[in-house]
Image: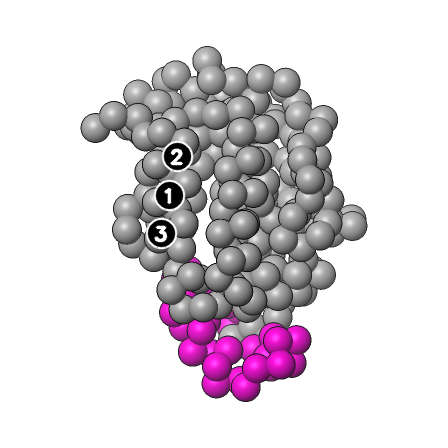
Amino acid sequence: MEVPTFVEIAERLSAANPLRKVGSADLFISLLREIAKGSPVSREKLAAVLGWPLGRVAAALDQIPNTEYDDGGNILGIGLTLRETPHVFEIDGRRLYTWCALDALMFPALIGKTARVLSRCAATGAPVSLTVTPDGVRNVEPEGAAVSLVLPDASPNVRGSFCCHVHFFASTLAADGWTAKHGDVLFVSVEDAFRLGQKLNQTLAQST
């Protein structure tokens, strides 16, 4: 296989997005905004926010793979999560997490908040930090930081086929050894990854 192109990845992610298939973009965005408040979200709360019957909320959630719940059935995560991951996502003093580097670049625009993102280079462990606003990225440290992208398969399980391969790196040079072990990976600048996230956000908005 060859390293996928930016366009191929964008098209495959848009096509594979389970939210488009079940018409649940409104649910997803509302749920992100509720999780961003820092507490588990009950289905009843989500139904009230959306103005949907509880059964419709339950049916939509059941069709979205990898949604995270606590023992009481409250929602803990769906891209943005209360469970610890390598990608810290700080909003208004609250420490949240994202499933992957691209999520951290996409979600500020969807929730209308600026986030401080703290992660580590997947190859060297060196710290990577940046500020993500709804409109762009700034204060990227180190300046040459990069993001790994892969071509997901057609599975609606985007976390398993894509997110687990999408990390921050201190530089493309630092990623050389990691690439040898992980196959066909495209490395892009943080700014280019942000632009990909905005394309995906636009596609999501069109399905609401």
Q: Residues within 10 Å of mark 2 (few under 14, many from 20)?
A: few
Which three-letter amino acid code belongs to the residue tagged 3? Ala
State the image quarter where residue 132 is shown: top right
Which residue is at the far top? 173
Q: Say if the magenta span includes residue 60.
A: yes
Q: In the rendered structure, find residue 7 and report the number of the disc placed on it.
A: 2
Q: Please, is residue 94 above or below residue 71 in the view?
A: above
- What label sits on residue 180 in the rendered view? none
Highlighted range, magenta: 43-72
Q: Secondary structure at mark 3?
A: helix
Q: Earlier in the sequence, mark 3 or mark 2?
A: 2
Residue named by callout 1:
11
- Mark pair 1, 2: CA separation: 6 Å
**Where residue 47 appears, x then y in whole percent?**
59, 79
User: Is residue 119 placed above or below 100 in the rendered structure?
Assistant: above
Label 1 packing within 10 angstroms: few (<14), some (14-19), many (20+): some
Q: Position of residue 111 (x, y in %)?
A: 67, 55
Question: Residue 10 or 183: which is nearer the viewer?
Answer: 10
Q: Are marks 3 and 2 in contact (CB under 8 Å)?
A: no
- The residue under the point 29% across, 54% down is 155
Taking the spot 44% from the left edge, 62% from the top edge, the residue there is 19
How far across and down, in percent of the image, does residue 115 sit?
70, 43
Q: Which residue is mark 3?
A: 15
In the picture shown, does residue 74 fall above or below 115? below
Q: Are marks 3 and 1 in contact (CB under 8 Å)?
A: yes
Residue at the front extreme? 206
